[in-house]
Image (cartoon, rainbow, N blue to C red):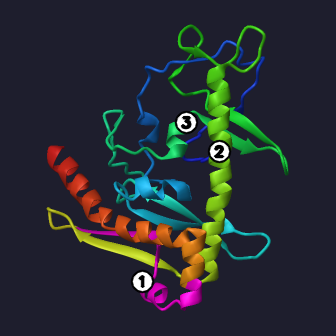
């Protein structure tokens, strides 16, 4: 998937144009995430992501078939727009890094109803013409590294489609509500975080038994539980922000 906030200049990977391109695996700088205050995660990532980030939902357009809002889960990195509290001097300060960020500078883009293409962000500083792992061999065939990356992207794209179904189920059951987080900073200033969606606990508790069983068997129940647990990380984000402000 292409995320405009992350992939600033995505282009399809071309075996002729990019024949000499190499990836420097020693380049671990994550400065390209500086302006990200959240990132899409797939359902399979909830178990890991909920331990470190608030996992909430955002409106992501409209489903053309049903007319309902498309809902996407995101891991939250900051309390204000363009704030990433997990980036420190180019390093990522968390044990779990969302899959979309791990795939960067690569991404999968849909180029037709059934066709996808591997894209790259050519401006990424980790690309080189002289050192690192080659993307293509001398014959122009994908290297083993590129094949592995393509498999990772294909799996990620499959999980993206599965995750859309989770959002559709939550919308269908009308379980989501607008979320608001209010906090007081150490200097006394007030901070409000909104624009996200969370599961309404009262509506969730009022679900009939047959719907709860359906959510359990589909795996959505576990995702809702992980989402609810993760909301405790909003306070941890506030602590990170206070520590950064104090250090500055």
Residue under circle 3? 104
Image coords of residue 213 (percent x, y): 56, 81
On screen, residue 14 above or below 229: above
Residue 41 in view (yes/no):
no
Q: Residue at x 37, y 56 (%)?
A: 53
Q: Residue 201 bears which disc, if any?
A: 1
N-terminal of the pair, mark 2 or mark 1, is 2
Q: Is residue 83 magenta?
A: no
Q: Residue at x 31, y 41 (%)?
A: 93
Is 11 positioned to the left or the right of 192 in the image? right
On screen, residue 73 above or below 158: below
Give the structural element (helix, strand or loop) at label 3. loop
Give the structural element (helix, strand or loop) at label 2. helix
Give the structural element (helix, strand or loop) at label 1. helix
Image coords of residue 12 (percent x, y): 73, 32
On screen, residue 24 above or below 62: above
Is 158 positioned to the left or the right of 43 in the image? right
- Quadrant of the rendered image containing residue 87: top left
The label nearer to you, 1 versus 3, is 1
Q: Residue at x 84, y 47 (%)?
A: 112
N-terminal of the pair, mark 2 or mark 3, is 3
Q: Residue 17 bears which disc, if any?
A: none
Image coords of residue 161 (percent x, y): 68, 57
Q: Residues within 10 Å of mark 1 (few under 14, many from 20)?
A: few
Residue under circle 2? 155
Instruction: Give the CA separation, mark 1 to mark 3.
Output: 35 Å
N-terminal of the pair, mark 1 or mark 3, is 3
Q: Which residues are magenta?
A: 190-211
- Quadrant of the rendered image containing residue 134: top right
On screen, residue 64 above or below 143: below
């Amino acid at each position: 998937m292409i995320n405009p906030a992350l992939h600033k200049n995505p282009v399809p990977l071309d075996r002729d144009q990019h024949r000499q391109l190499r990836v420097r695996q020693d380049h671990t700088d994550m400065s390209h995430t500086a302006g990200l205050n959240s990132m899409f995660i797939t359902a399979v990532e909830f178990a890991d992501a909920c331990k470190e980030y608030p996992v909430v939902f955002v409106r992501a357009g409209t489903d053309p078939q049903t007319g309902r809002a498309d809902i996407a889960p995101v891991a939250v990195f900051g309390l204000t727009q363009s704030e990433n509290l997990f980036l420190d001097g180019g390093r990522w300060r968390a044990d779990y890094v969302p899959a979309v960020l791990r795939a960067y500078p690569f991404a999968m883009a849909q180029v037709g109803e059934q066709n996808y293409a591997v894209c790259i962000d050519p401006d990424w500083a980790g690309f080189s013409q002289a050192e690192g792992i080659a993307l293509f061999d001398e014959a122009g065939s994908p290297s083993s590294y590129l094949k592995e990356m393509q498999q990772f992207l294909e799996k990620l794209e499959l999980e993206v489609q599965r995750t859309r179904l989770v959002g559709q189920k939550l919308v269908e059951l009308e379980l989501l509500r607008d979320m608001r987080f209010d906090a007081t900073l150490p200097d006394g200033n007030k901070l409000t975080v909104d624009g996200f969606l969370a599961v309404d606990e009262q509506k969730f508790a009022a679900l009939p038994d047959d719907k709860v069983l359906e959510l359990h068997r589909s795996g959505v129940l576990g995702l809702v539980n992980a989402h609810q647990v993760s909301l405790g990380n909003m306070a941890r984000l506030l602590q990170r922000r206070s520590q950064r402000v104090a250090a500055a």
